[in-house]
Image (cartoon, helix red, strand yellow):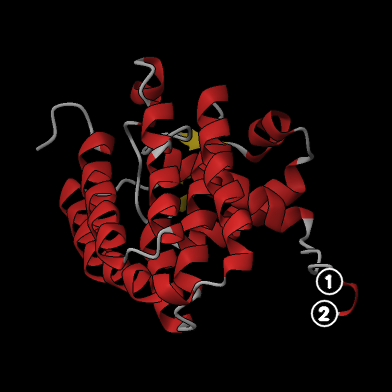
Amino acid sequence: MPGGFAPIEKISMRERIGRALHAAIISGELEPGTVYSAPSLGARFGVSATPVREAMLDLVREDLVEIVPNKGFRVTEISEAALDEITELRLLIEPGVVAKVTPSIPSADLGEIRALAEAIVEHAALGNLIEYTEADRVFHLRLLSYAENSRLSNLVSELRGHARLYGLSALLARGELEQVAREHLAIVDTIERRDPDAVEELMREHISQTRGRWARPGAG
C-alpha cells in the first residue's frame, strides 16, 4: 500500500453499537432471559435508541436476541450442551490451523499480533469485560486469517458469536482474569519461536480451559 499506511476501517454507528452489544451478550453483561429496551441500552452507550434498535434487529437475525413486543429485546439462552459442542468444534479447528500457519506468519506482523494480545491483558486489568471480549475475538480471528480460508474464519467467528462467557465477571471478581488474559501473550511467544507443536498445545489448553472457566456456577 502506498506510504505503508494500513487502511482505516470505516463502520457505521449501527455496526459499532452492534459489536458492543454482541460483546456484551457474549461476556454475560447482558444476561440471558433478560429483556432490555432500546432506550435503556442507548442511555448505557450514550447514543439514541435508533442505532441500538437497528443493531438489535441484526442480532435477532443471528438468534442472539428475540423481539418482545412493546418491551424490547430478550437475550436468548443457550444450553450447556450447546456450549460444549461449540468448544469441541473450536478444538477441532483452531489449534491445528494456528500451528500450521505459525512458520509462515510474517515477522513484520508479530509486533501487531503482540499488541493485540497486550490489549486483551489491558482490558482485563481495567475490568472492561465488553472490550476484553471484543479484543479476544479480534486476536483469535487474526491468527486464523493467515490460513487464508474465509470459510474457516467465518465458521469460527460464527461459533464464537453463539458462545456465552458466563464466568467472566466471577473471574474478574476473584482477580484471575488478567492471569487468563496473559495466556494470549504465551501463545504469541511460541509463535515468535516458530514452535508449531507448542502453539497447538497452548491453543488447545486455552480453549479447553476457557470452557470450564466460563461455565455457569454448578454446571457440569
Question: Disc 1 residue type?
Answer: Gly
Q: Residue at x 13, y 34 (%)?
A: 219
Label 1, secondary structure: give it: helix
Q: Real-space Cα distance between discs 1 and 2?
A: 5 Å
Please state the horizontal and vertical placement of residue 109, each as a whole percent of the image.
61, 64
In the picture of the structure, the residue carrying the numbered disc 1 is 4
Above or below: residue 117 compared with residue 193:
above
Residue 132: image x %, image y %?
52, 38
Q: Quadrant of the N terminus?
A: bottom right
The residue pinned by badge 2 equals 1
Q: Marks 2 and 1: in contact by CB < 8 Å?
A: yes
Q: Where's the C terminus, which quadrant?
A: top left
- 186 or 135, nearer to the observer: 186
In the picture provided, is 214 more to the left or to the right than 114?
left
Identify whether 200 is placed above or below 180: below
Q: Nearer the viewer, residue 68 or 173?
A: 173
Name the residue at 35% across, 45% down. 164
Q: Is residue 150 visible?
A: yes
